[in-house]
Amino acid sequence: MASATRNQTAKKLVCIVGSDAFHQEMIGRIPEAKDWQLEQVLHRTDVQPNGTFDFDTLLNEARAIISGFDRPPDAIIGHLDFPVSALVSLLCRDHGLIAASPEAVARCEHKYWMRQYQQDALPDHTPRVVAINPFDPDIMRKPPLPFPFWLKPVKGHSSMLGYRVREASELTQALSACRRAIHRYGEPFNAFLKHLDPAELPTDKIDGNYAVAEELISEDQLFTLEGYRHKGETTIYGAIESRRSGRHMSSLSSYYYPAELPGEVVEAAQQQVTKVLTQVGFDNGPFNVEFFHDPETGALNLLEINTRLSKSHAPLFEIVDGCSHHKQIIELALGQTPDRPKRKGTSPMAAKFMVRSHEANGVVHTVPCQEEIDKLCALMPNLKVQLLVNEGQNLSELVDQDSYSFELMDVFLGGESAEFIEDAYRRCRDTLVFLIKPMDDTD
């Protein structure tokens, strides 16, 4: 195997697929990074382009970059959804590295298949789900589920093309949106499936161009567990609370780490995801899993499993624990036993705020200037700001947005408590102002 040729005394060659300067620098601040040679394989804009993309082209480009290094890689990881999660699984298979199998990744990431495995593992905790072809004219004559329900593509992320459907007119609109754009990820996902062993995949014909209608399972509380599977054992090392806003309370507005959750809730969630991942056959890889929880009744519903760590949570781990949770995943990929986060950061709590526009569309007229950001950073030592739009940009040009809003800026803050952090965030929002001109005003 390739691993037998590796120089045990050299720095470990760690490839991060689809990264960018923000995350490369953050990973480089991990104390153990002194023992790693960190290499970026493809840029975030390569794997999240504006418009369609070809999966096999990305795979071949990544293979060429990795083969150009002076030795085989010791670990290959990523922190983005498809296509990165799929690319990582195939690249690790190429080099005989520790990772979940590509087939297990596909079984998790295909929304319909995952629910079928969940049904086998958790028959009393799985929502009703129906796979639908958005081009089937019979759907309008016979809706797949009683209203209301969620309509989602089999393969997507960031809630793109996800619609809460309450009546026939909304179903018409949701299906129209799917027909226009579902192929953007559907076709690359189908290309990924061609690299896999068909004997290890479901035999149905539900490919990446399908959508799912899914029973509503929303509860008041949404949280995410960060963890990994190794040799059949599930480890959870972080819990993050997610808060929502917007028209259907479906747009993520903020994350808080660590989540203030009872230990028995985390334990019950760990048991659920362990059963599903075992059923799926997912092992030797990272995951983050989202749950809805009702504190009043104790109801706990698994929303989805992502076969990667969450990049959105990485700065929160750095603020609270002293380094990003890339540390745990790189150690896992290197065959080491990952340490648990140390709680040795600069603040006991951290939050990410997603500043959004809920306009139907618009043009960015004004964005915060760097001088304003720098002044706030001098005032707030834990502040990190990522601007996601530019002046003159049409919001409709932003990629991978949810169906009801556009993300303009991410703000990361640390503090002694949620109240302290929220006060600091209000101060930031008073200074960091966006002006959006609705499209009707620009005609």
Image (cartoon, grey):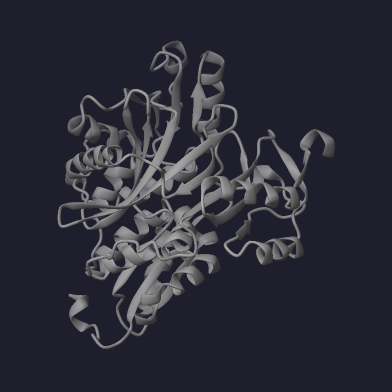
Instruction: Please give left or right for residue 97 compared with residue 49 in the image.
Output: left
In which quadrant of the rendered image does the N terminus lie?
bottom left
Instruction: Please give left or right for residue 75 compared with residue 4 in the image.
Output: right
The x and y percentages for residue 228 are 27, 54
Give me the residue at 24% from left, 34% from top.
118
The x and y percentages for residue 225 are 34, 46
Give me the residue at 71% from left, 46% from top.
394
Instruction: Please give left or right for residue 251 compared with residue 136 in the image.
Output: right
Depth check: 76 or 210 in front? 76
In which quadrant of the rendered image does the C terminus lie?
top right
**Please, is residue 344 above or below residue 351 in the view?**
below
Q: Is residue 53 visible to the viewer in this orientation of the structure?
A: no
**Please, is residue 96 above or below residue 127 in the view?**
below
Depth check: 384 or 93 in front? 384
Depth check: 109 or 337 in front? 337
Give me the residue at 51% from left, 28% from top.
163
The x and y percentages for residue 370 are 73, 64
Q: Quadrant of residue 216?
A: top left
Instruction: Please give left or right for residue 183 compared with residue 189 in the image.
Output: right
Give me the residue at 51% from left, 49% from top.
417
Q: Is residue 270 visible to the viewer in this orientation of the structure?
A: yes
The x and y percentages for residue 342 are 35, 64
